[in-house]
Structure formats: structure tokens, C-alpha cells
Image: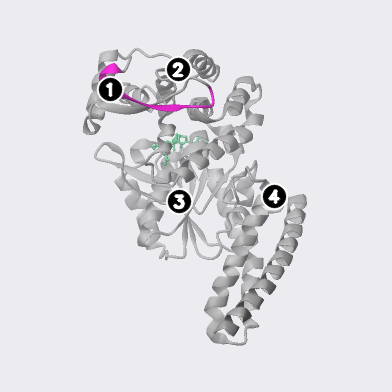
């Protein structure tokens, strides 16, 4: 036994040296990919590697074990390459932000084998889903479409049924995938279908509104509305990959763009003072959007990773939501979600931070005041929060780029 153990130690030492040697080659490949602007992922090469290496194995009983061993080595190498190419402050290889990336959907999504159902809505310019489909088809992937009507009213059981039917009638299987091309409505719905079809299949998200690009596309929350209650039926199902093409925002109506900017301002105010300054000094939003999106995603990714199931820290994303939600509901359709959150933030910002937030909201055509009576808001909040008692935890900002949680009595809310 002792001899055998020292033999293992010997082999492990040799493997340690080989590992170092392998990683230094991986590093050189990463540098070449970086210089050539190529993606980390190379599905064809990976497959070829797996096939070739396993065929050289003498003892066939070990094949399964060796395959797992190799897969881990490949994953570790890809992570190392990602860190080298994008730096430690990177979004990783699964969230890509790049102008014109729709045209490279097949390469960047790396869907692999299987069929793809592209889900979109009637308000999303058709060229986006067509471009994605063309890229996938050129790579030999069979694609089909399911288009739902646009608007929140269609994040519904009826739309869920329609997308599900497309999968069943198209004879999709567990190895196939759903790709969402659209805003948060399409992403939430398609993600929920992917979460539940055959107990979960792969989901890829290509968000095309600013709100979905910086917020809803990552975080794994998928849902539909039901019985008049938003997001009441849903599941956590993380997208395999998210592809963001800021160029798609050129067709987005100005009001929708501002709606997304409200969320960006929220994230900047609570967690990224530099992003706040970028938004303040920007004179060419189109040019600055890729960086704004990247920074928002870094912030949200950090929060989600620290609290994937929303049991603590993730509530920072609710800055402005306590009152914002009430304004949205009492406004009865007058305000978009982001607009309501914009006004909601002002109730919980103090001093100079409040002043800067208000100025920034005005710069991006977001409302800073409303005419809903305070008593109506109070009534809504009391009713809304009844289940959690008289106390609520709110997010407060008194210095841009930082926040604190505060538990207060609903009666003490200054509306
Ligand atoms: N899952 C999450 O974590 C999360 C977070 C925030 C919000 N959400 C959800 O997101 C939804 C709102 O998302 P949204 O604001 O993207 O709304 P949306 O999906 O309804 O899109 C807004 C409108 O823009 C159109 N559109 C989309 N892309 C376009 C483009 N590039 N050019 C022109 N028009 C385009 C759509 O057809 C739609 O009419 C809500 O249902 C909300 O609950 C989810």
C-alpha cells in the first residue's frame, strides 16, 4: 500500500510539471487569440480533441473517466484564457458585449449541435432574428421561429403555450435550445419555457432593449404574469450565454432607451461612482453605450453571484422600487417601470447624491415628479407589504456609488 501511494505521489508530481507546461502553451494560444480578436470558444476544435485523445486510450474501461478528466482540463484552460484575454475585471466568456455581434451569433453563442427555436416579438425589428437565424443556419444549425405579440400583456400563459407548442410540434429534444431575441418580455417568457420544457433545456439570450441588456438578461430570473400578477409563475434558469449587440439600440424608441437608463443610473448610484460620472459627462451616448452596458453588467453579475437566490444583498437592486412600484401601479400605465423607479429613487437619496441623481434623470428625459397623491401611494405600499408586517427594508444612498439597507416602519415613509 505504502509503495503504491508513493507511486501515485510520483505520478502527481510529474502531472504537476505537465500541467504547468500545458498552461504555458494555453497562455500563448490566448495571446494569439487576443491579438487576432478571436473568441475563446472553439467548439469544432474541442470536439476534434476529445475524439482524437480518447481513441488513443488502451484500456477502454477508462474511456468515461478519461473523458471527464479531459473535459475538466478543457474547462480550466478556457477559464484561464478568458482571464488572460478579458482581464480579471471581465464579464467572462458567457456574456458578450460587442457592436455587430448579431452577425457572428453562431460563433459567439457556440450552440453546438441540435436545433434552435428563436423566440421574438412583433415589435422587435425582424432583421435581428433573421440575422441570428442566418448566422446559425450557415453554421449548419436548424432554426425555426416563434413570434409573440409585443407588450407586457403577452408575457402570459397563452404566449407560453404558443412557444411550448412550437417546441413540441418541431419535435425538439433535451439537447436542443431556445434563443430569445428581444426585450425583457421575450427573455423572461422564452427563458421560462426553456426552464420547463423537458425539465429544462439550454437557453441563450440576445437582449435588444437597454433594460434587458443591462438587467433582465442576466440573473437567471424567468417568469410569466398570471391572474394579473406580474412574474408570479417562474423559475430560476440561467442562460448558457448572453449576446449583447448595442447596435440594436439604434432602433429602440427614445422613451424605451431612457427607461433602461433609469436602471443604469440606479446601479451607478448604488455601486459604481465612475459609471455615474460617465453618464454625467457623456455627450455621445451611442458611443458610450457599450461601456455603460458592460459596467452595469459587471455590477449586476457581482450582486447576483454573491446572492443568486435573492436572499440578501441582491435587494440592493431594489433601490427606488418600494415607492417606484407604487407609482407604477397607481399611475395605471402612465409610467414605464424605469420611469417609476427613477422617481422612486429620489425618495431614498439624500443630500448631494439626491441632487446629482435628479440632475442625471432630467438629462436623460426621465420624470422627477408625479401628481399621484401621497395618501394613495401610502395605501398601496401598506397593502403591498402587508404580508411582511409594518416594517420594510429599503435601500438608501447618501454618497454616489455606495448604499446602505435601512429597516423602517411603513408609517415613517416620507411620501
Ligand atoms: N428577469 C429579470 O431579472 C427582469 C429584470 C427586469 C425586468 N424584467 C422584465 O422585463 C420586462 C420589460 O422589458 P423591456 O423593458 O425590455 O420591455 P419589452 O420587452 O416589452 O420591450 C419594449 C418594447 O420594445 C420593443 N423592442 C425590443 N427591442 C427593440 C429594438 N431593438 N428596437 C425597437 N423596438 C424594440 C419590443 O417589441 C417592445 O414593444 C418586464 O416584463 C419585466 O418584468 C425582468
Mark 4 vs mark 2, CA separation in Å: 41 Å
Mark in front: 3 vs 1: 1
| Residue identified by numbered label 1 | 409
For mark 2, give the secondary structure.
loop
**Quadrant for the N terminus in the image:** bottom right
Mark 2 or mark 3: name the one nearer the start of the chain.
Answer: 3
For mark 4, give the secondary structure.
helix
Q: Is residue 360 left or right of residue 121?
A: right
**Alpha-carbon neighbours of circle 1 within 10 Å: few (<14), some, or many (≥20)?**
few
Query: In the drawing, what numbered circle is on residue 367?
Result: 2
Q: Is residue 12 left or right of residue 337?
A: right
Is residue 406 within the magenta segment?
A: yes
Relative image position of residue 335 (x, y in whole percent):
39, 23
Name the foreground residue: 249 vs 376: 376
Mark 4 or mark 2: name the one nearer the start of the chain.
Answer: 4
Name the foreground residue: 347 vs 170: 347
Whether residue 13 can be seen here: yes
Query: In the drawing, what numbered circle is on residue 25?
Result: none
Query: In the drawing, what numbered circle is on residue 85?
Result: 4
**Alpha-carbon neighbours of circle 2 within 10 Å: few (<14), some, or many (≥20)?**
some
Given contact means CB atoms under 8 Å apart, are the residues at marks 3 and 4 in contact?
A: no
Relative image position of residue 407 (x, y in whole percent):
33, 26
Magenta segment boundaries in residue numbering: 400-412
Mark in front: 4 vs 1: 1
Mark 3 or mark 4: name the one nearer the start of the chain.
Answer: 4
Q: Is residue 62 left or right of residue 41?
A: left
The image quadrant of residue 319 is top left
Residue at (53, 77) in percent of width and height: 65
| Residue identified by numbered label 3 | 238
Mark in front: 1 vs 2: 1
Mark 4 vs mark 1, CA separation in Å: 49 Å
Residue 193 higher or lower than 273, as above or below? below
Amino acid at each position: 500500500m505504502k509503495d503504491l501511494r508513493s507511486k501515485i505521489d510520483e505520478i502527481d508530481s510529474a502531472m504537476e510539471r505537465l500541467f504547468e507546461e500545458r498552461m504555458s502553451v494555453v497562455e500563448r494560444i490566448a495571446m494569439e487569440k487576443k491579438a487576432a480578436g478571436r473568441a475563446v470558444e472553439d467548439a469544432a476544435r474541442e470536439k476534434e480533441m476529445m475524439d482524437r485523445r480518447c481513441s488513443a486510450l488502451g484500456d477502454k474501461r477508462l474511456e468515461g473517466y478519461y473523458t471527464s478528466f479531459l473535459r475538466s482540463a478543457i474547462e480550466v484552460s478556457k477559464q484561464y484564457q478568458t482571464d488572460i484575454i478579458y482581464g480579471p475585471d471581465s464579464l467572462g466568456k458567457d456574456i458578450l458585449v460587442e457592436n455587430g455581434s448579431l452577425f457572428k451569433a453562431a460563433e459567439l453563442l457556440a450552440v453546438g449541435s441540435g436545433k434552435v427555436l428563436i423566440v421574438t416579438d412583433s415589435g422587435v425589428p425582424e432583421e435581428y432574428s433573421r440575422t441570428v437565424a442566418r448566422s446559425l443556419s450557415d453554421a449548419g444549425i436548424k432554426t425555426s421561429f416563434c413570434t409573440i405579440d409585443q407588450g407586457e400583456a403577452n408575457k402570459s400563459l397563452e404566449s407560453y403555450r404558443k412557444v411550448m407548442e412550437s417546441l413540441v410540434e418541431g419535435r425538439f429534444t433535451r439537447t436542443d435550445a431556445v434563443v430569445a431575441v428581444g426585450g425583457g418580455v421575450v427573455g423572461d417568457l422564452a427563458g421560462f419555457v426553456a426552464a420547463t420544457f423537458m425539465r429544462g433545456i439550454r437557453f441563450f439570450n440576445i437582449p435588444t432593449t437597454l433594460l434587458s441588456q443591462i438587467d433582465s438578461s442576466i440573473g437567471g430570473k424567468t417568469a410569466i404574469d398570471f391572474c394579473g400578477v406580474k412574474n408570479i409563475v417562474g423559475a430560476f434558469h440561467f442562460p448558457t450565454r448572453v449576446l449583447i449587440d448595442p447596435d440594436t439600440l439604434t432602433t429602440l424608441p427614445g422613451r424605451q432607451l431612457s427607461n433602461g437608463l433609469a436602471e443604469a443610473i440606479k446601479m451607478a448610484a448604488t455601486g459604481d461612482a465612475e459609471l455615474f460620472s460617465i453618464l454625467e459627462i457623456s455627450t455621445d451616448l451611442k458611443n458610450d453605450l457599450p461601456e455603460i452596458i458592460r459596467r452595469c453588467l459587471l455590477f449586476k453579475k457581482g450582486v447576483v453571484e454573491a446572492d443568486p437566490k435573492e436572499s440578501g444583498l441582491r435587494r440592493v437592486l431594489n433601490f427606488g422600487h418600494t415607492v417606484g412600484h407604487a407609482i407604477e401601479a397607481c399611475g395605471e400605465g402612465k409610467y414605464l417601470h424605469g420611469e417609476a423607479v427613477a422617481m422612486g429613487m429620489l425618495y431614498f437619496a439624500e443630500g448631494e447624491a439626491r441632487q446629482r441623481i435628479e440632475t442625471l434623470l432630467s438629462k436623460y428625459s426621465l420624470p422627477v415628479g408625479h401628481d399621484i397623491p401621497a395618501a394613495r401611494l401610502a395605501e398601496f405600499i401598506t397593502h403591498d407589504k402587508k404580508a411582511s408586517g409594518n416594517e420594510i427594508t429599503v435601500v438608501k444612498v447618501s454618497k454616489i456609488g455606495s448604499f446602505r439597507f435601512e429597516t423602517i416602519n411603513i408609517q415613517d415613509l416620507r411620501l
